[in-house]
Image (cartoon, rainbow, N blue to C red):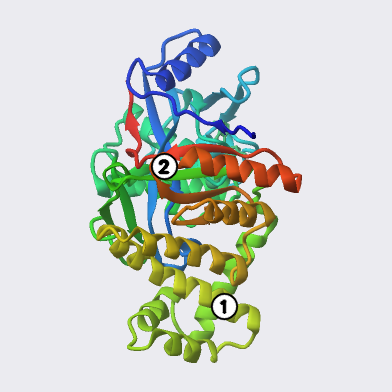
Amino acid sequence: TTTVEFIQPWTQGADGQGATKARELFQKVYGLDPQGVWSAPGRVNLIGEHTDYNAGLCLPIALPNRTYVAASPRTDSRVRLVSSMDPENPVQADLDGLQARGVSGWAAYPVGVAWALQRDGFPQVRGFDLALASCVPVGSGLSSSAAMTCAVALALDDLFGLGLGGDEAGRVRLIQAAITAENDMAGASTGGMDQSASMRCRSGCALRLDCRPELDAMSNVRQVPFDLQSAGLELLVVDTRAQHQLNDGQYDQRRATCEQAAHLLGVANLRQVADQVNGAADPPSALAALLEQLPDEIMRRRVRHVISEIGRVDRFVEAFGRGDYVLAGRLFNASHDSLRDDYEVTCPELDEAVDAARQGGAYGARMTGGGFGGSIIALADAGKGSDLACDIAERFASKGFKAPRALIALPSSAAARES
Ligand code: ADP
Ligand code: MG
């Protein structure tokens, strides 16, 4: 029978595996002890996909898999960086005179965070030495990029005494710096869910994130209990290892179509019409009437996904909250089918993995993250995850796909100092 690699998260804490790996890499490369170690998690989004940039709702949990950053401040403007992914090749940058897109490669993410904080009114941010080690799968739709930028943001907050990490409003400013780093320095479009998840999730909870720009830090999130263990459930994550590349223009095209549609409908964002439709006495006919106002079939399908997906978030919260896991699973399925048929961001590997999980007895399964590759999640009875992962691996072998890998997700905690 087929076996599947399960990715084990590293242990946290000052003497945990994560802090130790980051610290040892720092010592090896720079010959000194770091001033501290910080970490931030990757995430999976339970439901509410491609809604963040439409001012919609989403529902991420933090993964137990985290990125660990050992760092010390410098008094000049130089940045030295090394990653456990490429430990023999430290890289350097300079914050002085740095422009958008002025750093290439992975260094753009951490350097971009410092650059964004400086521009956001924190000139006390200077150069730094940094070593990072991660057990978040990279490029798998589990947000290794936000795990990295959020760990760095929290490190810089402490190293330079910005005082932002201790409360929600401060964390929102760190989130903004992480988003700016990704958008403007790394050149990767991001809608903000990943960074909010990494900075604001709580252990045992899903984060109901309301992305309306007019909301403040106190009113845009709600912690929703998501206790899989006492529900007798397991959340399986399977990385399909299919190429996930949001930079090839598809993601930006989807965003542009949504913006055009909002413009045609005379609203600032699709959330404004989503609330009308989902709150109508007869949502399907309200949706049909709205879609009639749009000029082409593709745009109608894109909008139908966004509006129906925003509506599914609170239905999922409600169903899970009262223990209706069958309905919760059906909402996962409806989300995936909408992403496949209307939004067209899945790929054969995602569709096959979801199908195999459903056939194997999951309550429901869906792609998670931006799509075009990356990972799926499946909601199943406790103890079923590894069987489902094997089913998916067998399906992949029969299709000639790469062997997938898996992890069991438990809702974990936000970015924090480790030592
Ligand atoms: P995802 O966030 O889903 O993992 P992205 O394409 O958004 O995928 O981000 C992946 C990129 O982030 C990598 O190509 C690399 O540039 C950077 N990255 C993430 N984690 C690390 C790491 N530990 N070391 C070096 N670069 C990293
Ligand atoms: Mg990312």
Provide residue 411's location: percent of width, then percent of height: 35, 42
Query: Nearest the camera: 238 or 50?
Result: 238
Q: Residue furthest front?
A: 1
Answer left or right for 228 relative to 335: left
Residue at the image point whose x is 53% and y is 56% from the top: 358
**Percent x, y for residue 394?**
66, 42
Q: Check the image and report above or below for 220 versus 238.
A: below
Name the residue nearer the viewer: 205 or 316.
Answer: 316
Quick one: which residue is furthest to the top in this view?
31
Which image quadrant: the N terminus?
top right
Q: On the image, numbered disc 2 is attached to which residue?
A: 117
Q: Residue 147 at x, y = what percent?
A: 46, 38
**Does ligand 2 reach within 8 Å of label 1's beta carbon?**
no
Q: Secondary structure at mark 2?
A: helix
Could you tell me which residue is drawn at 28 percent across and 46 percent down?
A: 227
**Quadrant in the picture for residue 72:** top left
CA–CA distance in space, label 2 to label 1:
31 Å
Name the amino acid, label 2.
Leu
Residue 382, quarter of the rendered image: top left
* Position of residue 63 in the picture relative to residue 419 (left or right): right
Closest to the observer: 374 or 258?
Answer: 374
Q: Which residue is mark 1?
A: 260
**Residue 291 marker:** none
Q: Examine the rendering and report whether any part of residue 408 can be seen.
A: yes
Q: Earlier in the sequence, mark 2 or mark 1?
A: 2
Residue 235: where, in percent of width, then height? 42, 45
Amino acid type, residue under disc 1 in the picture: Gln
